[in-house]
Amino acid sequence: MTALAENLARVEEAIAAACRRASRTRAEIELMAVSKTYPAETVAEAAALGLTLFGENRVQEFAGKASRAEELWAELVVRRPRVHLIGHLQSNKAAKAAEIFDGVDSLDSLRIAERLNEAAARLGKRLPVLIEVKLSKEETKAGIDPESAEAAQLLERLPDLDHLEAQGLMTIAPWGAPEAETRACFRSLRAWRDRWAQAHTRLNLVVLSMGMSGDFPLAIEEGATRIRIGTALFGKRAPYAGPPE
C-alpha cells in the first residue's frame, strides 16, 4: 500500500467516526482532495484510488498541469475527476478559470460572477459555483462579508446568470482557533445558508464546503457536505514556486 493509500484510509476512518458521532451517513460527505502544488502524477495516483473531486488554488498552476493530468487519467482508465478552483479568483483570470475548471468554489463578488457567466456562455457550459463567505476576522482570509450590500446584490443577481449554477457556500475557519470558535464558524455558515435559502428560493444552496485537514471532523459534526483535505492526504506540501497570480 502506498503512502497516499494509507493516508486516504486514515482520513476515511476519521470521516466515518465523525459521521457516527453526528448520526450521519458517509454518503452525505463529499471528499475533495486539495492537490495544489502537487504534480499531475500525484493527482493521477489519487484518482486511481477512487477520488473524484480535486481542489486547486491557482488558475495558472492548474493550467500548467492540466494536460498532463488528462493524459494520465486516460492511461489509467479512470473516470475523469472534477477539478474545482478553491483559491481567490482575480477578474482577469475568470475566463481561463471557466475554461479549465469544472467549478469555482470561491465566488466572492458580483463582478466575478458576471465575468464567469460571460465566459461560461462563450464556452457553452453551465459552471457550478459556491459563494465563499468570510466569517473570520483574519485579514488574509478571502470571501464576501455576509452582511454586506455586495452579498445582497450577489444573491439577488445570481439566479439570472444563466450560465452559473449556484450550489452552496464555502468558508475557512480561523487558523489554530479553539474548538468552540471553529464550531461557531461552521455553525454560522450553516445558519447563513439556511437564511439565504429561505430568502432566495430560486437558489439551490445545498453544498456546505467547510473543514480541512486540521478540523474536518468538527465540520462534519456541524453539517459540512464537502470537506477539503490536502495535507492529511498528500503530506506536507512544498511552497508554491510558480509565478504570482
Image (spheres, rainbow, N blue to C red):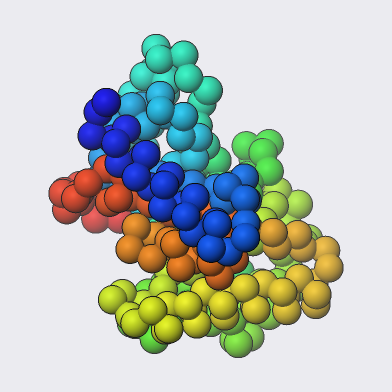
Q: Quadrant of residue 70?
A: top left
| Viewer-nearest residue: 164 or 220 | 220
Q: Which residue does the image show at 40% across and 28% down from the upper left?
A: 49
Look at 57% across and 80% down and name the residue there.
188
Q: Horizontal and vertical percent for residue 237?
A: 20, 49
In the image, 92: left or right of 192?
Answer: left
Image point 27% across, 51% down: which residue?
231
Which is more toward the observer, 234 or 162? Answer: 234
Q: Is residue 80 visible?
A: yes
The answer to whether residue 157 is left or right of residue 232 is right
| In the depicted structure, whether residue 162 falls above or below residue 77 | below
Work out whether 194 lies above or below 38.
Answer: below
In this rendering, the count of numbered labels is: 0
Height in image: 8 above or below 138?
above
Residue 147 lies in quadrant: bottom right
Q: Residue at x 76, y 52 (%)?
A: 162
Image quadrant where one finds the N terminus: top left
Q: Residue furthest right?
A: 201
Residue 80, given in percent of the width and then of the height, sits at 51, 26
